[in-house]
Amino acid sequence: MIIYVTGGVRSGKSRFAMDLALQKSANPVYVATSRIWDEDFGRRVKRHQDERGPEWTALESERDIHLLPLAGRVAVVDCVTLWLTNLFVAFEYDIEKALAAFKAEVDALLTVDATLIIISNEIGMGVHAETEAGRKFTDLQGWANQYVAAAAQEAIMLVSGLPLILKTIQ
């Protein structure tokens, strides 16, 4: 099962997803898709780590999330934006290859017997990127977000910390 949680930067997505995971499991998994690029980002990751209690199992993977030991678990995958960045760079900014790899990964995750709460930044609510690579990434993330939302059984958007239910399939 996939629960898709989207929203703008600092909208409360991660906190909402983590609270939801704790409602569903006493021992959830936190899947970090990032790598540390600089000191500021390292501080942000540390803050996220400090917010999680001892009940959490933390796993890190820049891609190939479906290979992690998630069966039978509730896991928060944080986040699609960083996951896509890893793929975008790995495929040398080729959006078709990066998107195909992402879709294959989502399809593989659909076969895992787990509850996956996948977080992503909503795209297209801000300034257009000034660079070609930035515009390509915007396209990539927009298409990837649509793919995950279509595959998800539930989709929730956070606006100023408030959850808006976009989709529920019973």
Image: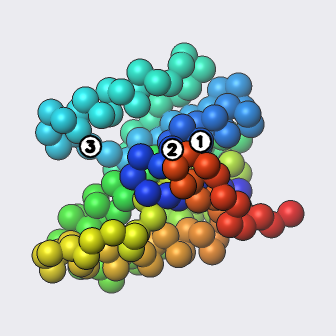
Measuring from the top left, give residue 54's x and y in whole percent.
54, 16
| Quadrant of the rendered image containing residue 110 | bottom right
Measuring from the top left, give residue 18's x and y in whole percent.
58, 36
Nearer the camera: disc 1 or disc 3:
1
Nearer the camera: disc 2 or disc 3:
2
Amino acid marked by disc 3: Arg
Amino acid marked by disc 1: Phe
Label 1 with label 2: CB-CB less than 8 Å: yes
For label 3, the SS is loop
Return the residue nearer the eye: 28 or 139.
139
- 3D distance between C-alphas at marks 1 and 2: 6 Å
| Quadrant of the rendered image containing residue 132 | bottom left
| Residue 111 relative to residue 127: left or right | right
Q: Residues within 10 Å of mark 3 (few under 14, many from 20)?
A: some
Measuring from the top left, give residue 107's x and y in whole percent.
57, 69
Give the residue drawn at x 51%, y 44%. 12
Label 1 with label 3: CB-CB less than 8 Å: no
Q: Which residue is mark 2?
A: 12
Give the residue drawn at x 50%, y 58%. 7
Label 2 with label 3: CB-CB less than 8 Å: no
Amino acid marked by disc 2: Gly
For label 2, the SS is loop
- 3D distance between C-alphas at marks 2 and 3: 21 Å
Give the residue drawn at x 32%, y 27%. 46
- 3D distance between C-alphas at marks 1 and 3: 22 Å
Q: Residues within 10 Å of mark 1 (few under 14, many from 20)?
A: some
> Is residue 99 visible from the viewing direction of this image?
yes
Q: Residues within 10 Å of mark 2 (few under 14, many from 20)?
A: some
Q: Which residue is mark 1?
A: 16
Q: Which residue is mark 3?
A: 35
Return the residue nearer the eye: 108 or 43.
43
Residue occupying the far front of the picture: 160
